[in-house]
Image (tube, rainbow, N blue to C red):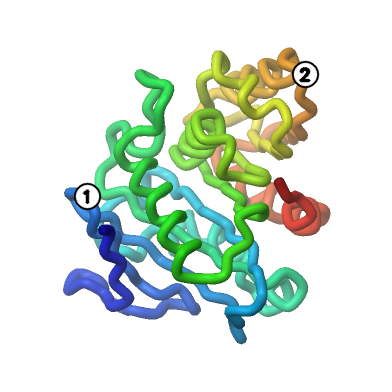
Amino acid sequence: MCTLLLTANPSVAQNNVDGFVARVYKDQSPAMPYRLFIPKGYEQSQKYPLILWLHGAGSVGKDNLKQISGASRLGTHIWTTPENQAKHPAFVVAPQCPQNAGCWDDGRTNEPGRYLLAVVKILNALQTEFSIDSARIYVAGQSMGGYGTWDLITKRPDLFAAAIPLCGGGNAALAAAVRRMPIWAFHGDADPTVPVGLSRRMIAAIEQAGGHPRYTEYKGVGHNVWERAFTEPELMDWLFSQRK
């Protein structure tokens, strides 16, 4: 049985930051810290969507804070503003990978790697604990988390209603698995960290398989594409309108 702790571990500075409660998933070694945002006024009788956020390489560690702060803050807090929660009350979960190398994606296998498997177990446990709509679970991630988003949806497409991969890449050979999934991918054509060709390749592979993903490529934009993507006026309503 997995163990999900509501209280922070000794290395966590604050148990609650902007409504994100510190928890630790203990059913593996090393343990996986994560933050959970619970909608204000949560009622067990109501079904809620959930957004899974996969952070970039700069947020790895064990502090259970970097994945909701710094470069990752926009990716978690965009969904939790009072305005957005009033219109789309939703859970947000942000796990923190304890190490960098091969963290979220694993191109050597057709199954998710150990850390993404832990993320899947966290999702399963949260659905048991809370009233979460299994038809409205979404995933988004930036940079390394963009790779993780592609990796997770192509290997476990049954879990998600929609995905937002930002400046990532994936295994084009698995693209057919998500040909029916609503996807809105983003990349800057001047990205010096993750080549824009990686997103183009995934989009082309999905289209070749008969899918119709959305893809926004910003001219002259570098790696921090999330700063533009999360200002797209249609993004919020687009995401929450998707269901399996």
Quadrant housing residue 88: bottom right
**Residue appearing at x 26%, y 53% in the figure:** 61
137 displayed left or right of 65: right
Badge 2 marks a residue whose secondary structure is: loop
Q: Amino acid at mark 1?
A: Gln
- Can you give x and y, in whole percent of width and height, for residue 155 in the image? 50, 30
Q: Residue 45: which disc?
A: none
- Can you give x and y, in whole percent of width and height, for residue 147 in the image? 48, 33
- Mark 2 sits on what residue? 210
Q: Amino acid at mark 2?
A: Gly
**Residue appearing at x 28%, y 55% in the figure:** 32
3 displayed left or right of 94: left
Quadrant housing residue 39: bottom right
- Mark 1 sits on what residue? 28
Give the answer, above or below, for where 142 lies relative to 176: below
**Residue appearing at x 58%, y 35% in the figure:** 157
- Can you give x and y, in whole percent of width and height, for residue 218 in the image? 72, 35
Give the answer, above or below, for where 207 lies relative to 115: above
**Residue appearing at x 63%, y 64% in the figure:** 78
Residue 39 seen in the figure: yes
Q: In terms of depth relative to the viewer, which is nearer, 98 or 91? A: 91
Give the answer, above or below, for where 242 lies relative to 6: above
Badge 1 marks a residue whose secondary structure is: loop
Residue 232 seen in the figure: no
Give the answer, above or below, for where 133 lies relative to 144: below
62 displayed left or right of 106: left
Considering only order in the chain, which callout, 1 or 2, is on the residue closer to the N terminus?
1
